[in-house]
């Protein structure tokens, strides 16, 4: 398996606060990697840099062999289309129906697939086939996050980034979402990078990268035989 | 609360500055533009009692041409053309023509009197003595004023008739200084020749022009041969033919020669349809350099003059003395004492002679010409007021010098400008002689090319009672029983006394090109610069004496005064108004008369006053309205952005009035600051834009700005105070009631617009107001030639497009563009997480920009359609019609609005592409 994400000596500061401080990280294709750490550790910043929603102050970010941090407008747009992003706050468009929210990323461009069929397939996959006409405001938090996941996957992204996907959900719902994410990852063969506080979520991943104060303080590759939760507990 | 207000202004400085800018623009524009709303206004005062309408609505005369009497009595004299020979320049005429609302502007250039003689032939063949020759003595009396004036010719006319041939060649005639008699020789048996001049060649006398009547001190002698006529000339054009003995009686007519614009005259009076012979006048091409003045003549002379003729046959030996060669010195005393027997009495009326004269003037034989060498202008009649509407006409004295022929002795001949006989009578107008320069080769000649009958002018019979018709003869009716008896119950008419009391209407008309030729060739060129006497103006859209028609006329009249400085009289509602005139006795028998003339009671007077242009004020108030909408949007946005904060304050126990007061105080302070800034800016802005300095008006900016800000902040402040705390912490953007399924970016833009309908409508409303203003102005400028006069709610109003109005509309558009940009910016800010999510999910920056531009265009379309429809509706309500130009103007204004809205979205569209995705998405 080749390296799909390569972060080399990346730094990012917001004013005096250093969000990332010389991070190096490589992620292989097909891996599910959890970024764990307390608030302010730099998890979201790293996700944003990989998703090209922000630019590093120094270092290089490579995704699928392409250096992302130097991309210009069109390249950035192309890159973002290859990445699915799930936000903690879902960020659905409140005026659009569930189906149209899923379709929103492909609304301004041509695609080589039947977008509505694809959206319905994804809604089926996230268990919301019967709510496609509903407004986001009419859904529960878990349902909204399912819609956000479906929206992230509409463009067949090989890489899924999720920023605290269960952070706004209760534990049961959060677990459902985690299960869903991993089921879809299996189904679509994606690489997945998640930022999370949640050990349950991290436990489901192939690898757990622990961060603190903008640095990587641990990188555990989890084998199926290991009790991930134990290791996480030990490492923490 | 004060601290909170101060903190808000300090920490939300961006929004405060946007609000401040809006109010500053509004208050400054209002302060500066209100100075331009002052305009001159001509107001018709007095009731329009009578529903007369003449062929024209406004009479334009040279400045100062209205007499004191006319001004004091509100009258226009019946003979209004009298005494006005020039005074209006061609460029002034062009200005009048170009004034909006002028349907026809028909000028009359009174050139002057020209005298032209006509002849009548009296056959006396049957009265000849037997034998070869006979002499007749013709005694004449000119009878005018309905028979009251009788002017005997001072000397008789002698006619020498012979059955023998008379020899006279043209060359000889020329050598003999153009006097027929001087070269004529009667051919006697045996080819002997008897020069006629020996007895009939009475010497010239230089004192000839020194006394009236015009005929000289010495009698006139003519000869005629029944065999050869005058010799080698063909006199058939004056009714003479060989074989017959004919006495030729000539009568001279003074014509008022005027020039008109043939096209304008046809449109105003229908003169072209009154033609009874020949052709109508046409404009010559500029290349026309011929010296021939083409004339249109009235087919009726409107002259009361006739000649009573007594023909006496002299004793047989009188004629024999001529061939015997009795010298004139002895022959004349003989003639004085042998007056012969009366053999015929004839009366020749003006009409007879006039008709023949016109024919002769039209059918000028080849090689002949009628030179135009002299003409006379006359001043107006002076009156003494006798109380009430009673006037006494004041006689004047013209020096005999005015009749002196300046061409005496030159190649034109010496005797072409003799005074008409009637000129001996009492005179009332001062004459000024004018001499036309030029020789036979380059001088001016004249020809009658057509005749018109004034009675055939459209509506003539009805209009004769209307005042100030151009071709009507002046009516001087008997004013009392005595005069009625003297005049036989008839009116007095003009006659050949050119300086007499009544001036005939223009009977001879030339076109303006020929008028220029005359003006250029007149010695001293007195009328070359300002040749026109009056301009009669018909205003388009005038249907009667209704208020709208009055307004139309008053506007055009004001524009004429403003553009030319000329004197205007409004004829709307004018009617004949009897004025009694005491006419002193004439010198030849006419007793003093009391006449009644139909002067023109103008019916309406007018005054020119400075007034506010109501339409401009409306536009400036609209500027304020646009600003109010702008500020309202800004204030509402500020409140929306602080809903959570206000909600918290409400939770902390702040009362509704306090919250209301806080928000209102904020906008009030902004208004105060903006007003102060505007007061400082108004002067420099006015100076920069060339508008009158605002002066003390600058202080208007402060209350205007505060009031505007408070008004605009009222609703947002009220809403802020009414929202329950729990509601206040909800999202600013209202959630929709039903889901939307946008097809593409455009659909999403539409969905975005409907998310905050109030704000969308505010943006559209600002544009709509601007589009409304521009539609009305463009419609007025192009659809109604710069002016609309119409009725709104029963009130006659005038809408005129002025530069200041366009400036106001430009300000409105600028503010509207700012408002649209603000609406889009606020929408973008409030939906930034959604937009960032879209961007993060792969939306290209261009697609997001397109979304914003489409939203802007949507606002633009909404405002454009509403404004254009409103503007077109206003134009329709005002005028009852929608010319294509108004519709085109509406579309153009709408196009400008949409383009501007799209342009206004450029800044938000640029900003949306630079949203800090990471920061926005990480919020909350």
Image (cartoon, coloured by chain):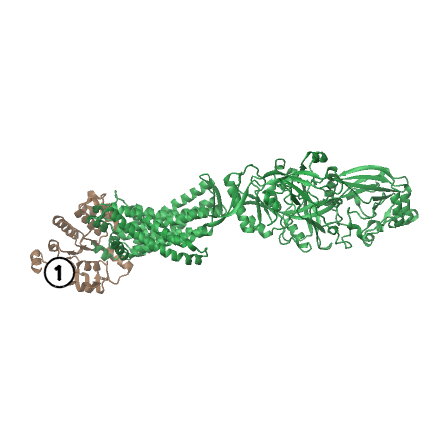
Chain colours: A brown, B green
How many marks the image carries: the answer is 1
Question: Is residue B792 among the parts visible in the rendering?
Answer: yes
Is disc 1 surrounded by few (<14), some (14 to 19) or many (20+) residues within 10 Å?
many
A53 horizontally vs B145: left or right: left
Residue picked out by circle 1: A210
Identify the image quadrant of the C terminus of chain A: bottom left
Left/right of residue B190 with respect to residue B907 in the rendered view? right
Quadrant position of the N terminus of chain A in the picture:
bottom left
Closer to the camera in the image, B521 or B131:
B521
**B634 and B2: which is toward the camera:** B2
Q: In front: B35, or A117?
A: B35
Report the residue that reaches farthest toward the front. B387
Where's residue A87, x and y in %?
20, 53
Give how far across and how far down residue B249 sits, in percent. Answer: 79, 42
Q: Give the chain letter at badge 1.
A: A
Question: Residue B856, percent across and down?
Answer: 34, 50
**Nearer to the camera, A118 or B458:** B458
Secondary structure under the numbered disc 1 in the rendered image: strand
Question: Residue furthest toward the right?
Answer: B190
Image position of B187 (left or right of B914): right
Return the x and y of residue B422 as percentages of the image width and height: 74, 44
Q: Where on the picture, by quarter, is residue B74?
A: top right
Would residue A106 be seen by someone viewing this image from the given angle? no
């Amino acid at each position: 398996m080749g390296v799909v994400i390569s972060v080399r000596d990346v730094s990012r500061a917001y004013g005096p606060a250093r969000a990332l401080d010389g991070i190096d990280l490589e992620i292989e294709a097909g891996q599910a990697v959890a970024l764990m750490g307390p608030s302010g550790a730099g998890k979201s910043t790293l996700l944003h840099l990989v998703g090209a929603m922000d630019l590093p102050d120094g270092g290089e970010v490579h995704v699928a062999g392409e250096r992302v941090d130097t991309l210009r407008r069109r390249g950035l747009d192309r890159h973002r289309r290859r990445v699915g992003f799930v936000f903690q706050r879902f960020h659905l468009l409140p005026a659009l129906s569930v189906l149209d929210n899923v379709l929103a990323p492909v609304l301004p461009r041509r695609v080589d697939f039947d977008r509505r069929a694809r959206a319905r397939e994804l809604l089926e996959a996230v268990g919301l086939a019967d709510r496609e006409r509903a407004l986001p405001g009419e859904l529960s938090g878990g349902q909204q996050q399912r819609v956000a996941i479906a929206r992230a996957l509409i463009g067949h992204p090989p890489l899924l980034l999720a920023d605290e996907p269960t952070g706004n959900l209760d534990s049961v719902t959060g677990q459902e979402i985690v299960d869903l994410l991993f089921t879809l990852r299996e189904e679509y063969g994606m690489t997945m990078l998640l930022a999370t506080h949640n050990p349950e979520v991290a436990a489901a991943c192939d690898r757990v990268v622990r961060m603190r104060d903008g640095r990587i303080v641990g990188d555990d590759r989890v084998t199926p035989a290991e009790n991930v939760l134990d290791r996480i507990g030990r490492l923490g | 609360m004060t601290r909170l207000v101060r903190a808000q202004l300090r920490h939300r400085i961006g929004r405060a500055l946007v609000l401040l800018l809006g109010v500053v623009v509004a208050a400054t524009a209002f302060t500066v533009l209100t100075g331009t709303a002052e305009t001159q206004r001509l107001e018709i005062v007095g009731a329009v009692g009578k529903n007369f309408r003449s062929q024209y609505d406004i009479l334009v005369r040279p400045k100062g041409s209205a007499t004191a009497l006319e001004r004091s009595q509100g009258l226009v004299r019946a003979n209004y053309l009298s005494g006005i020979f020039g005074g209006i320049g061609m460029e002034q005429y062009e200005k009048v023509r170009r004034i909006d609302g002028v349907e026809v502007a028909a000028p009359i250039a009174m050139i002057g009197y020209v005298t032209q003689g006509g002849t009548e032939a009296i056959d006396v063949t049957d009265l000849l003595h037997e034998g070869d020759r006979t002499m007749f003595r013709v005694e004449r009396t000119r009878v005018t004023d309905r028979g009251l004036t009788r002017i005997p010719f001072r000397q008789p006319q002698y006619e020498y008739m012979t059955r023998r041939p008379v020899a006279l060649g043209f060359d000889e005639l020329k050598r003999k200084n153009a006097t027929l008699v001087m070269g004529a020789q009667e051919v006697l048996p045996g080819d002997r020749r008897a020069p006629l001049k020996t007895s009939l060649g009475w010497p010239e006398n230089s004192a000839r022009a020194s006394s009236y009547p015009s005929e000289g001190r010495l009698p006139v002698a003519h000869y005629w041969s029944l065999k050869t006529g005058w010799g080698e000339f063909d006199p058939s054009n004056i009714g003479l033919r060989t074989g017959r003995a004919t006495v030729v009686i000539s009568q001279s007519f003074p014509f008022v020669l005027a020039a008109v614009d043939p096209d304008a005259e046809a449109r105003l009076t229908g003169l072209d349809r009154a033609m009874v012979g020949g052709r109508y006048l046409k404009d010559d091409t500029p290349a026309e350099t011929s010296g021939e003045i083409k004339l249109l003549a009235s087919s009726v002379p409107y002259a009361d003059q006739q000649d009573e003729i007594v023909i006496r046959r002299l004793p047989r030996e009188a004629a024999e003395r001529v061939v015997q060669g009795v010298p004139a010195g002895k022959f004349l005393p003989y003639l004085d004492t042998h007056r012969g027997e009366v053999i015929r009495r004839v009366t020749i009326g003006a009409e007879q002679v006039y008709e023949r004269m016109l024919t002769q003037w039209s059918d000028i034989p080849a090689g002949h010409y009628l030179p135009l060498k002299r003409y006379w202008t006359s001043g107006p009649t002076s009156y003494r007021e006798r109380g009430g509407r009673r006037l006494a006409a004041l006689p004047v004295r013209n020096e005999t010098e005015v009749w002196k022929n300046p061409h005496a002795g030159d190649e034109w001949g010496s005797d072409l400008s003799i005074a008409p006989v009637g000129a001996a009578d009492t005179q009332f107008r001062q004459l000024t002689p004018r001499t036309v320069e030029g020789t036979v080769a380059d001088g001016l000649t004249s020809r009658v090319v057509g005749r018109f009958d004034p009675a055939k002018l459209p509506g003539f019979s009805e209009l004769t009672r209307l005042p100030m018709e151009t071709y009507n003869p002046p009516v001087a009716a008997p004013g009392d029983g005595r005069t009625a008896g003297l005049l036989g119950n008839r009116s007095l008419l003009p006659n050949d006394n050119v300086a007499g009391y009544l001036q005939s209407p223009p009977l001879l008309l030339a076109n303006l090109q020929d008028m220029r030729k005359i003006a250029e060739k007149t010695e001293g060129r007195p009328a070359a610069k300002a040749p026109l006497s009056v301009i009669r103006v018909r205003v388009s859209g005038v249907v009667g004496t209704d208020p709208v028609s009055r307004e139309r006329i008053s506007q055009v009249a004001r524009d004429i005064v403003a553009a030319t400085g000329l004197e205007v009289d409004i004829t709307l509602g004018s009617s004949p108004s009897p004025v009694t005139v005491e006419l002193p006795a004439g010198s030849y028998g006419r007793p003093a008369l009391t006449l009644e003339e139909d002067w023109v009671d103008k019916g309406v007077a007018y005054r020119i006053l400075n007034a506010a242009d109501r339409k401009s004020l409306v536009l400036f108030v609209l500027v304020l309205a646009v600003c109010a909408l702008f500020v309202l949007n800004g204030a509402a946005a500020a409140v929306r952005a602080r809903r959570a904060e206000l909600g918290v304050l409400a939770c902390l126990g702040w009362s509704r009035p306090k919250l209301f007061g806080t928000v209102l105080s904020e906008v009030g302070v902004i208004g105060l600051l903006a007003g102060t800034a505007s007061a400082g800016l108004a002067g420099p802005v006015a100076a920069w834009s060339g508008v009158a300095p605002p002066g003390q008006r600058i202080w208007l900016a402060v209350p205007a700005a505060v009031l505007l800000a408070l008004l605009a902040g009222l609703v947002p402040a009220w809403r802020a105070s009414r929202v329950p705390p729990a509601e206040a912490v909800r999202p600013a953007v209202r959630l929709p009631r039903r889901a939307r399924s946008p097809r593409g970016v455009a659909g999403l833009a539409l969905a975005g617009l409907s998310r905050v309908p109030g704000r969308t409508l505010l943006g559209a409303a600002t544009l709509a107001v601007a589009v409304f203003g521009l539609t009305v102005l463009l419609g007025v400028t192009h659809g109604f030639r710069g002016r609309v006069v119409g009725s709104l709610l029963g009130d006659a109003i005038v809408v005129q497009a002025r530069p200041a109005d366009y400036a106001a509309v430009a300000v409105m558009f600028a503010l509207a563009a700012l408002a649209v940009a603000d609406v889009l910016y606020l929408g973008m800010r409030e939906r930034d997480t959604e937009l960032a999510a879209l961007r993060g999910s792969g939306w290209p920056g261009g697609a997001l920009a397109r979304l914003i531009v489409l939203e802007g265009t949507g606002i633009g379309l909404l405002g454009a359609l509403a404004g254009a429809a409103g503007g077109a509706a206003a134009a329709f309500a005002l005028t009852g019609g929608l010319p294509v130009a108004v519709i085109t103007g509406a579309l153009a204004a709408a196009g400008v609005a949409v383009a501007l809205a799209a342009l206004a979205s450029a800044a938000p569209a640029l900003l949306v592409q630079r949203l800090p995705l990471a920061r926005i998405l990480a919020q909350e």
